[in-house]
Amino acid sequence: MKRSVAAMLVALAAAFLSACGSHDAAAPPAPRTDLKLGTVEMRDVDLTYSSEAVVEAVRQSTVAAQIAGRVVEIRFDVGDFVQKGDVLVRIDERAATQAVEVSQAQVAEAEAALRNARANYERSRQLFAQRFISQAALDKAEADYKAAAARVAGLLAGAGQVATERSFATIVAPYSGIVSARHVELGEMAVPGKPLMTGFDPGTLRVVANVPQARIAAISHGGKARIEIPSYNRWIDVKKITVVPAADPHTHTTLVRLKLPGDVRGIYPGVFARAHFVTGVASRLLVPRAALVRRSEVTAVYVLGEDGQPRLRQVRLGTASDENAVEVLSGLLAGERVALEPVKAGMPAPKTSS
């Protein structure tokens, strides 16, 4: 009995010592294999000069009322796409229709008077040829005929003007585009000059930037640029660069217009942009943009060490960049691997089930 108890105590002590030894000599963590990695590399990139800019539409207009009347129909609202010729707003045209009817009645009356004056003039000519009336009577008949013809011509012109004014009751889209503002409500009174709707053509967008005069020569020589839209995280190749031949004497800057492709969608006038003008080509050390971690004024990346574990390292960035990578001035070496999922890299590795 005593021997069995002693043997049990020895076994428990051995198990305890074995457990303590296993904790003291813990195995190193396994290399991280759950991270998506990128490589720091040296390659040729475009050297650029960047300038703040804004998007604007080449064709943007506000349609206004040309006659007075109550707004009786609004067919489109902000954000709607309209085709050229689509009816935007209708104004009550009853007063204009009545004016057309009045003018048509006046034209009919004047035409009847013209027919009577023509017949009287023809009779007067025959009577004068037979010497039954004087030259003065013939002249009066001719004058009456010409006056009646002139009155008909004047009334016809007035009738055409009234008919044209009635057509102003239907406001149509001057070109295909997007409605960006609606300035009138149903039932409001429209008067000549009152804005009704504002729209723009999304196929005629451009970006405008004010560039220092000292940079104009390099920009004109390069002839290439890209537009960055930070709010949409988009980069767009510029179709054409136009340097406006005039400078601001107060700011010593020149306006540069950058035409965007016609198939660009989702971008609207007034959006903030950055214009990156290409001024040359050079070899630079680049790190993927997805690897960057920004905390206040600190920029860092998670670098994969020799043991396969990501470690945070502060870096200093340069100016050369594109939509995928950015220049790094210090903190990294070519060939080092960085985590493209920095949030995931900063968290403990998931435990694997045994």
Image (cartoon, rainbow, N blue to C red):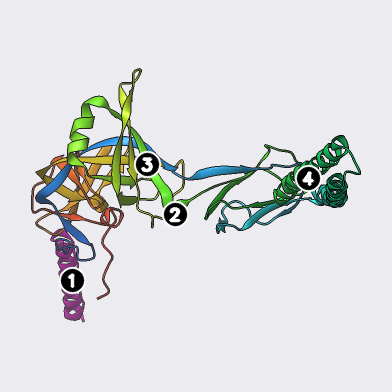
The reply to whether discs 4 and 2 touch (Cβ–Cβ < 8 Å) is: no
The secondary structure type at the circle numbered 1 is helix
Corner quadrant of residue 133: top right
Residue 207 numbered tag: 3
> Mark 1 or mark 2, which is nearer the start of the sequence?
1
Residue named by callout 2: 266
Q: Amino acid at mark 3?
A: Val
Question: At which x and y percent is residue 84?
Answer: 55, 57
| Quarter the C terminus occupies | bottom left
The reply to whether discs 1 and 3 touch (Cβ–Cβ < 8 Å) is: no
Within 10 Å of disc 1 (Cα), the crowding (few <14, some 14-19, many 20+) is few
Residue range highlighted in magenta: 1-26
Using the image as rendered, state which of residue 49 and residue 331 is in the foreground. 49
Closer mark to the observer between disc 2 and disc 1: 2
Residue named by callout 4: 149
Q: Is residue 160 left or right of residue 20?
A: right
- Measured Cα–Cα span from mark 4 to mark 1: 128 Å
Within 10 Å of disc 4 (Cα), the crowding (few <14, some 14-19, many 20+) is some
